[in-house]
Image (tube, helix red, strand yellow):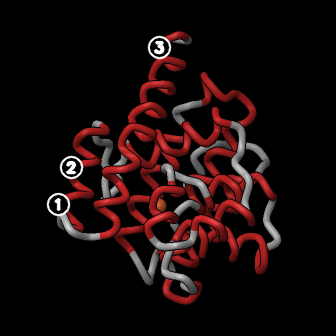
Amino acid sequence: MPIVGGVGQAEWARDLAEDLLATALPRRWAHTQGVAQRAASLTPVLGEETDTLIAAAYLHDIGYAPNLVETGFHPLDGARYLRDVIKADDRLCRLVAHHSCAVNEALNRNLFEALTSEFDEERPELVEALTYCDMTTGPDGIHLDVTERLAEIHSRYGPEHLVSRSITTSTPCILAAVRSVEAALSARA
Ligand SMILES: [Fe+2]
């Protein structure tokens, strides 16, 4: 079920992500499809760039796929796979590498240098848009308010987990991204 018609990267990315996630990690695939649906809803803000955002949404969590895990830090593993194996567009690699304020978890994993030296940031509007889509979609692909989503991550991982600690550090960055996209959406409503 393509989300948007026409040509572009979105359908290609959907097929790649489905191959990597649907059987191995069905819940992650459900989340991924929800994030892609959120991305499609940003057409009023992003126009033609929506296709790139949808593609990045499909690909953002492929780093969890068991057969491509290397460091265990999924933004970096996913971005490296896209760069080295798939030879994907740089923008997609960068968006995946930095999705949802990943630099903070990179710091906690001693992978900050690797992440930031290998992958530059994309344009803030696209980075924030992907963060918005991920952080307003629950683990089963259902739309959640950002505060519900943050609470869900904390409860799923538990308070001591590196992911929970990283999400705490990232919360101002995540909230700023969500507010920025919401403001852009309401300005065009
Ligand atoms: Fe992710």
Q: Does 122 sit left or right of 134 as displayed?
A: right
Q: Residue furthest bottom?
A: 67
Q: Position of residue 7 (x, y in %)?
A: 79, 48
- Residue on which disc 1 sits: 155
Residue under the image location 60 percent in, 62 percent down: 59
Q: CA distance from mark 3 to mark 1?
A: 31 Å
Q: Tag 2: residue type?
A: Ala
Residue 60 drawn above or below residue 169: below
Q: Position of residue 105 (x, y in %)?
A: 45, 62
Q: Secondary structure at mark 3?
A: helix
Residue under the image location 45 percent in, 23 percent down: 182
Asked if disc 2 and disc 1 are in contact, CB closer than 8 Å, the reply is yes
Q: Does 161 sit left or right of 97 as displayed?
A: left
- Residue on which disc 2 sits: 151
Asked if disc 3 and disc 1 are in contact, CB closer than 8 Å, the reply is no
Q: CA distance from mark 2 to mark 3?
A: 25 Å
Residue 184 or residue 48, whichever sits in front: 184
Q: Does 30 sit left or right of 151 as displayed?
A: right
- Residue on which disc 3 sits: 186
Looking at the image, tell me whether mark 2 or mark 3 is earlier in sequence order: 2
Residue under the image location 60 percent in, 75 percent down: 77
Residue under the image location 36 percent in, 43 percent down: 171
